[in-house]
Image (spheres, helix red, strand yellow):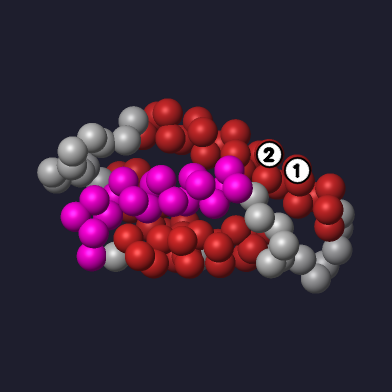
Amino acid sequence: MRYALVIAMLLGSTPLAQAEPIDRNKWIAQTARASKSCLAKFRQKFGEDKGHNYSNCVTDQTNKAIDDCVGSSEFSNCVLEKSLRVLEGCDLSSC
């Protein structure tokens, strides 16, 4: 849940001082593709198994990945980049 809230806040925020702001429209498109692909892999691996939850798996991984963004002057970019990397990596081993 924290992942969804952080992403929602970042999409609505304007970066203050960033060296190179991320193109949010491009990030949204990349995230949508990566999420769709990862969900397909998840369904292929686990099917309808009730013991595995895609959103919990991805959220847990994302929360761990973005923890080191806290306190960064580039917090917004850091969170966007790391959350995208989690989806692109689609590590289902801990699900």
The region drawn magenta spans 71-89
The answer to the question of whether label 2 and label 1 lie on touching residues, with beta carbons closer than 8 A, is yes
Asked if the magenta segment contains residue 85, the reply would be: yes
Q: Which amino acid does label 2 sit on?
A: Ser
Residue 61 falls in image quadrant: bottom right
Asked if the magenta segment contains residue 77, the reply would be: yes
**Mark 2 crowdedness (10 Å alpha carbons): few <14, some 14-19, many ≥20:** some
Residue 49 falls in image quadrant: bottom right
Q: What residue type is labelled 1?
A: Ala
Locate residue 86, reporting x and y percent: 54, 51
Observer-nearest residue: 11 or 87? Answer: 87
On the picture, is 16 further left or further right than 75?
Answer: left
Which label belongs to residue 37? 2
Observer-nearest residue: 35 or 50? Answer: 35
Residue hosting label 1 = 40
Locate residue 73, reporting x and y percent: 19, 55
Residue at (60%, 39%) from the top-left corner? 34
Observer-nearest residue: 94 or 23? Answer: 94
Residue at (49%, 45%) from the top-left corner? 84
**Mark 1 crowdedness (10 Å alpha carbons): few <14, some 14-19, many ≥20:** few
